[in-house]
Amino acid sequence: MQRETPLTFFEYIVLSVLSEQPERTLRMSDLAARTSASLSRLSHVVGRLEKRGLIERARVPGAGRRTVATLTEAGHHEVVAAAPGHVAAVREYLIDQLEPHDLAALRRIGTAVKAAINGRRPDADPDQAP
């Protein structure tokens, strides 16, 4: 990925997660959870992205040390430009290496993991709230 874009894989994931949020904004603690990163690692990476103008951070008024990260327009352009290369790499290194029965197993595994994350059984109706 770094051969085709100035982003590391983790930076791409951070920008991608933000790009999918309402107003492209998320609390840093939630962003850390969604990217499976510690707050200190995330803060370091967000600081780099902020210096490049791809993310802005802001304190949330009130008690506690709450901060949100917002994807800037430049950050959105960067993640959109990087997405085709990311998709191509996933296809080349993962999807194209699997047999049809492996893909079916991967689909079942993904469905089960997504259901667990969303608090549902894998066989539950996905349109129903947990």
Image: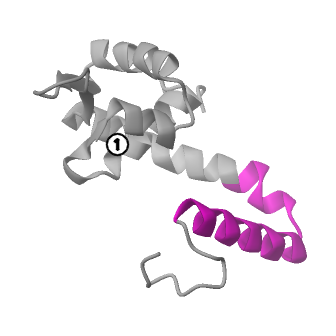
Residue 114 location, quadrant: bottom right
- For this orientation, the residue located farthest to the left is 61
Q: Residue 123 at what x, y percent from top left?
A: 66, 84
Q: Residue at x 49, y 26 (%)?
A: 7
Q: Is residue 84 left or right of residue 122?
A: left
Q: Is residue 49 left or right of residue 95?
A: left
Q: Secondary structure at mark 1?
A: helix
Q: Is residue 101 magenta?
A: yes
Q: Which residue corresponds to mark 1?
A: 18
Q: Is residue 51 visible to us here?
A: yes
Q: Is residue 117 magenta?
A: yes
Q: Residue 74 at what x, y percent from top left?
A: 24, 32
**Colour scheme in the image?**
one colour
Give the answer, above or below, for where 33 lies relative to 130.
above
Q: Is residue 4 visible to us here?
A: no
Q: Nearer the viewer, residue 125 or 76?
A: 125
Image quarter in which the N terminus is found: top right
Local packing at callout 1 (Cα closer than 10 Å; few below 14, some 14-19, many 20+) is many
Main SS, magenta residues: helix
What amino acid is labelled 1 in the image? Leu
Give the answer, above or below, for where 81 lies relative to 47.
below
Give the answer, above or below, for where 36 lies relative to 100.
above
Q: Residue at x 72, y 72 (%)?
A: 107
Q: Residue 21 at what x, y percent from top left?
A: 30, 51
Q: Residue at x 58, y 26 (%)?
A: 2
Q: Residue at x 77, y 54 (%)?
A: 94
Task: Find the magenta span and give its range.
Answer: 91-118
Q: Nearer the viewer, residue 68 or 120?
A: 120
Q: Is residue 117 left or right of residue 79?
A: right
